[in-house]
Image (cartoon, rainbow, N blue to C red):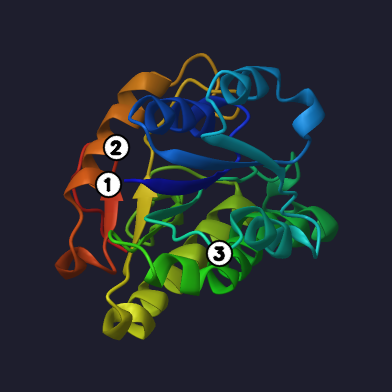
């Protein structure tokens, strides 16, 4: 990948992906909600000789996609990785649903990634690799019924999965590969300290997926270890 864009790049999986891509020599457009608080990312950018470009991307705001398009300018994007997301707040149990929180979760996890991809289609189509990837979750799979609650989060990821599979059909003629990814249960701020795998393990697997993607795999849903996940 020569040029990539990653949202949610200030910590966890997004930051580690940014590090890996920068180390490989790629130009990295790194979107974060508050660049002034993204100390590790800003340090990476400072030492990158201009290869890491930090820009404001707040998925809650109407200007998020436009900010990303402006940051990229006319550059082609080998990989557009919509990684930013939220777990959705405390009110996600049956009988305790907060409508405002639910709507915000859908905005951040579902609507914003769709608008981001729509705004940058031409940049992706102009690249060599032509990949759009969405960070989803197995909790958005209708085949997953192992755990309760988290209605807003599950719904937002299930909707994102459907968006991705539909987008794969729409963009096949343009040669663009569209996939959704499950990062695993990762020890991040969102996943918590008791999660199964480290950030490094998840990113290792996802980077291998990116490296091996082809148009024939468009529209598929992968776990971080490369295994397919049922919708």
Mark 1 lies on residue:
210
Mark 3 lies on residue:
74
Which residue appears at 50% of the width and 40% of the height? 28
User: Is residue 145 or residue 104 the one in the foreground?
Assistant: 104
Mark 3 crowdedness (10 Å alpha carbons): few <14, some 14-19, many ≥20: few
- The Cα–Cα distance between marks 2 and 1, rounded to whole angstroms, is 5 Å
- Is 32 left, or right, of 157 in this rendering? right
- Marks 2 and 1: CB-CB under 8 Å? yes
Q: Position of residue 41 (x, y in %)?
A: 62, 24
Query: Which numbered disc, 1 or 3, marks the residue closer to the eye?
Result: 3
Element type where label 3 sits in the image:
loop
Q: Position of residue 96 (x, y in %)?
A: 77, 50
Element type where label 1 sits in the image:
helix
Element type where label 2 sits in the image:
helix
| Number of marks in picture | 3
- Is 88 left, or right, of 84 in this rendering? right
Which residue appears at 31% of the width and 38% of the height? 206
Mark 2 lies on residue:
207
- The Cα–Cα distance between marks 2 and 3, rounded to whole angstroms, is 25 Å
Q: Quadrant of the C terminus?
A: bottom left
Q: Position of residue 187 (x, y in %)?
A: 48, 20
Query: Which numbered disc, 2 or 3, marks the residue closer to the eye?
Result: 3
Is residue 170 among the parts visible in the rendering?
yes
Mark positioned earlier in the residue sequence (2 or 3): 3
Looking at this view, name the residue that lies furthest to the front.
49
């Amino acid at each position: 990948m020569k040029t990539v864009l990653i949202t949610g790049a200030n910590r966890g999986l997004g930051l580690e992906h940014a590090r890996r891509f920068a180390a490989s020599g790629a130009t990295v457009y790194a979107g974060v909600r508050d660049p002034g608080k993204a100390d590790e990312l800003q340090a990476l950018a400072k030492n990158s000789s201009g290869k890491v470009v930090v820009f404001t991307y707040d998925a809650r705001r109407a200007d998020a996609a436009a900010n990303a398009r402006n940051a990229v300018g006319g550059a082609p994007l080998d990989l557009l990785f919509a990684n930013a997301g939220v777990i959705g707040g405390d009110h996600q149990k049956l009988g305790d649903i907060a409508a405002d929180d639910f709507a915000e979760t859908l905005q951040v996890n579902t609507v914003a990634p769709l608008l981001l991809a729509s705004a940058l289609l031409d940049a992706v189509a102009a690249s060599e690799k032509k990949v759009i990837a969405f960070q989803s979750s197995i909790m958005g799979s209708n085949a997953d019924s192992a755990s309760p609650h988290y209605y807003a989060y599950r719904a937002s990821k299930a909707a994102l999965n459907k968006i991705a599979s539909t987008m794969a059909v729409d963009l096949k003629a343009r040669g663009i590969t569209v996939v959704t990814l499950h990062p695993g249960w990762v020890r991040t701020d969102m996943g918590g300290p008791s999660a199964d795998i480290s950030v490094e393990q998840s990113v290792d697997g996802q980077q291998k997926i990116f490296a091996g993607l082809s148009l024939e795999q468009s529209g598929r849903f992968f776990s971080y270890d490369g295994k397919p996940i049922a919708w």
